[in-house]
Image: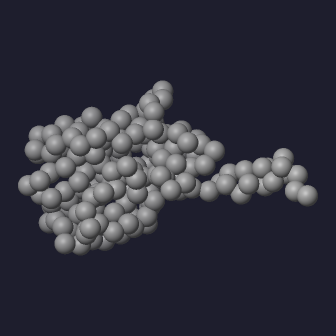
Amino acid sequence: MVNRRDLFSTVLAAIGSATMADGAKAGNPQDIALNLYWSAPSNDYATVTPQQSNLGPDYQPISVEGYIWLVQRPDTLPLRLYWSAARGDYATVASPQSSLTLQNAGYQLLSIMGYIYATQRPGTVPLRLYWSAARGDYATVASPQNGLNLQNAGYRPLRREGYVFPP
């Protein structure tokens, strides 16, 4: 006969470090994944949470760039998703300077996806904004390897948007 308490403990241990389908980390539901997508036809990178991942059929997932808060906490900034129909470009930013730059370029605010730290906290990594004038594309990544890949593709780093939890 199976002891219910032992079975329950086993199940909890098995899911304790898993990632749920909606991007939230089990046992820490306030964190949600921040995913990088690429569309070859649009020449566009998009960094979004699972709730905003319906970008279109041409967008393919590349990586999880980190985890963000769903609710605002002390020393956090809203992580905003913008869209430019003229450029066919999604842009993800948190700094007031980046938001103003996008608004002045005609980007429309689509949503606040969550919140990231304004200053580095233990266990966090920088989330950086890159720009490609040739592609008319902003890209936001936390992975050092993806940052290097962007620079090798002609993107230039613009600024640190804030800090996220690494994958």
- Most extreme residue toward the top is 74
User: 81 or 148, which lies in front?
Assistant: 81
Query: What count of labels does the image hold?
Result: 0
Residue 14, image x and y in percent?
71, 57
Question: In this view of the protein, can residue 69 be seen by the observer?
Answer: yes
Q: Is residue 43 left or right of residue 157?
A: left
Choose top left, top right, bottom left or bottom right for residue 43. Answer: bottom left
Q: Residue at x 8, y 55 (%)?
A: 86
148 is higher (above) or lower (below) than 25: below
Q: Is residue 145 left or right of residue 96?
A: right
Residue 80, image x and y in percent?
30, 41
Choose top left, top right, bottom left or bottom right for residue 162. Answer: top left
Quarter in which the N terminus is drawn: bottom right
Residue 34, image x and y in percent?
42, 52
Q: Residue at x 36, y 46 (%)?
A: 160
Q: Residue at x 19, y 56 (%)?
A: 89
Color encoding of the figure? one colour
User: 6 or 129, which lies in front?
Assistant: 6
Question: In this view of the protein, can residue 118 be seen by the observer?
Answer: no
User: 159 or 82, which lies in front?
Assistant: 82
- Most extreme residue toward the front is 1
Q: Residue at x 26, y 67 (%)?
A: 57
Choose top left, top right, bottom left or bottom right for residue 54. Answer: bottom left
Residue 84, image x and y in percent?
14, 51
User: 43 or 124, which lies in front?
Assistant: 43
